[in-house]
Amino acid sequence: MIKDSLRVGALHSRSIEVDRERTISFLGEDLRIYATPKLIDDIEQTCLDYLLEFVDEGENSVGTAVDIAHTGATLLGMSVRIEVKVTGIDGRAVKFDIAVFDDIEQVCTGSHSRFVVNVEKLKARVSDKASRAGIVSA
């Protein structure tokens, strides 16, 4: 369960350098810029890492929605600052507003939602679904 110390309005931020793995390649070497899927991954990871401070042992969270506008090109080697703000807590569901800034400008706005899960219960549900689908787990 989410601890009472997590409050609507809580703020968290993380800075990341845009390395080669985070950039697109399809426009050539001169246009290696932050790839939107990598930006989304970094947003989700930032929210996950923050939320884990407020859940019990044996719990984690999964993303349930992402809605962003990626509005600026961030170059390879630049830094970004991902700022997240808790805007809603409803039971095990948490919603964040997102703002991302590079060294020059704001490059992203949006929202992200996560749901706190009991890892063992989720593992059991996934195992049951895999069994019904005929998927053998490794």
Image: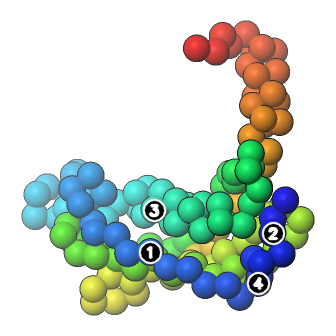
Quadrant of the image occupied by residue 134: top right
Of 129 and 120, the residue lying toward us? 120
The reply to whether residue 108 is visible in this rendering is: no
Left or right of residue 93, residue 82 in this image? left
Badge 4 is on which residue? Answer: 8
Badge 2 is on which residue? Answer: 3
Left or right of residue 43, residue 52 in this image? right
Distance from Cα at disc 4 to Cα at disc 2:
12 Å
Q: Earlier in the sequence, mark 4 or mark 3?
A: 4
Q: Residues within 10 Å of mark 2 (few under 14, many from 20)?
A: few
Q: Earlier in the sequence, mark 1 or mark 2?
A: 2
Q: Residues within 10 Å of mark 4 (few under 14, many from 20)?
A: some
Of 36 and 94, the residue lying toward us? 94
Residue 68 position within the rendered picture, expressed as x and y whole percent measured from the top left: 55, 71
Mark in the foreground, 1 or 2: 2
Residue drawn at (61%, 84%), measured in percent from left and top? Answer: 11
Residue drawn at (83%, 75%), measured in percent from left and top? Answer: 4
Distance from Cα at disc 4 to Cα at disc 1:
19 Å
Residue 42's label in the rendered image is 3
Badge 1 is on which residue? Answer: 14
Quarter of the picture containing the C terminus is: top right
Residue 42 position within the rendered picture, expressed as x and y whole percent measured from the top left: 45, 62
